[in-house]
Amino acid sequence: MEALVAAALVALGGLAAALYGERRRTARLRAQLEAAALDLQQLQATCARLAPAGVVQRLLADGPGAVAEISAERKVVTALFADLVGYTAMSERLEPATLARVLNGYFQRMSDAIHEHRGHISTFMGDGILAFFGALQPNPWQCDDAVRAALAMRAAIRGYNVELARAGLPALAVGIGIHRGPGLGGLVGSRERMEYAFVGRTVNVAARVQALTRTHKVDILVTEALRAELDARFALVPMPPERVKGIAEPVVTYAVQ
Amino acid sequence: MERLPDSLRVRLLRPLIRRLLAAHQARGRPAPLDRTPTHPYGGLVQVFAGSPIAPALARTLGDMWDSSHLPRRAKLLIFAVIARGLGCHVCDAEAARALRTEGLDEAALAQVLGHLDARDLTPLERALVPFARETIWYEPAPLQRRARALRDALTRPQFVETIGVVSLANGLCRMGAFVVDHP
């Protein structure tokens, strides 16, 4: 009888030890899993600075195979091109560190205005910003969103200029061109380096229209194609048609009040 | 919450949970629709006729339309905006048809679905329409920010009903886009 009790105690002890070991192993694996999840979150946050968050999530979820899927999608989007007026002169006057601080403040405010209105920034080009509306997800209200974003950018620049004046720095002015049209959106580039981009005439037109803001001495210009889809309650002023490089017909634009 | 299934208490309850789930599965037999739903989006319920989903969906939809915290037109506008955003043509057309019977003329309908606002809308509808659009592509941070702003503009029952209606509309219009638009 005593031997039986002893055997049972040994068996129980063995079982307890096995359970304890199992619990420790589970706790260790859980800690590893949590650390991996945290790493993944950090990786996503870092990558989201380089590409739209939706694209990053899809790449992480579907793996490299998703590249081919994301790489070619024909769609109609609204392109917004913004550029600082008088940037070259300002960059020559300011210290590099001050210039970087001013530019970062500018980019942050413009990004916030664009994201708030469901746009995504495709790229920063020097002092220029190229943003798209309706590129990542279908957006039937993309034209209104883009113009609201431009108005928010105008307001943000005004607010930022007050801060700059307080710091004894020169005021910024921005020119914004907006156009709507078809193109090819997705991951483009080489095997070594890819980026999410939208290619096509639409982007060129938005850039040319942005350049016209200097000619017409206004800050926000939209094309006829965009105006046709825009809420009629936006106040627009027609500008004289202008010839621009790379486009055969004179471009009709409207200034947004 | 994620660890709950592995907790000792839940593991001890597993046999009971298994029995409950099995009983639930037993109820999930094909169930005929008692009657053809006549309310908006009843056609979508009809698509699932014969499946246990159909009567549950019909009941949920019926209760949603009958609930009085939000006006029927406001709920239809939520459905219409979500259908437009998701590109569900059948749902879009159904909402538009129902909105016309609610007294929204063609021009106002085009304006509200094209630009998410119109002069003919009531202040409540003007708050709900842009919010409905925010729920289409789930982006937690902006959605929560806008939901908080909406909560301040509505009564508690209205807000709770809004969340229910947008959830149902998102589910239904997605099903519609998948099942009806692409059978």
Image (cartoon, rainbow, N blue to C red):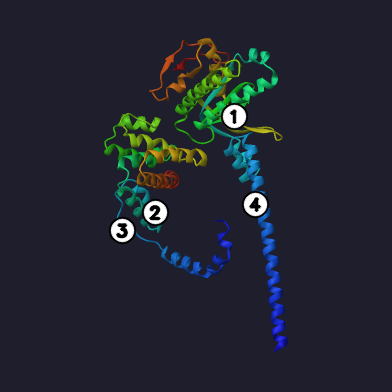
The residue to which callout 1 is attached is A122
For the residues beneath circles 1 and 4, the answer to whether they share a chain is yes
Q: Disc 3 designates what residue?
A: B34
Query: Which is nearer the N-term, disc 1 or disc 4?
Result: 4
Q: Quadrant of the N terminus of chain B?
A: bottom right
Which is in the foreground here, disc 4 or disc 3?
A: 4
Q: Which residue is mark 4?
A: A34
* Structural distance between the alpha carbons of marks 1 and 2: 42 Å
> Dividing the picture into quarters, in which one does residue B108 lie?
top left
Location of residue B92 with respect to B20 vertically, above or below: above
Q: Nearer the viewer, mark 4 or mark 2?
A: 4
Identified at 40% across, 39% down, the residue is B152
Q: Which mark is residue B48?
A: 2
Q: Pick the residue in front: B37 or A213.
A: A213
Marks 1 and 4 sit apart, C-alpha to C-alpha, by 32 Å
Amino acid type for the residue under numbered disc 3: Asp
Check contact, mark 4 vs mark 3: CB within 8 A.
no
The lab-note entry on whether marks 1 and 2 share a chain reads no
SS at badge 4: helix
Give me the residue at 68% from left, 76% from top.
Answer: A12
Circle count: 4
Horizontal side of B159 relative to A88 (left or right) equals: left
Looking at the image, is mark 1 or mark 2 nearer the viewer? Answer: 1
In this rendered view, identify the residue nearer to me: A202 or A143. Answer: A143
Q: Position of residue A164 (x, y in %)?
A: 58, 19
* x, y percent for residue A25: 70, 62
In the image, is residue A186 above or below residue A206? below
Q: CA distance from mark 3 to mark 2?
A: 13 Å
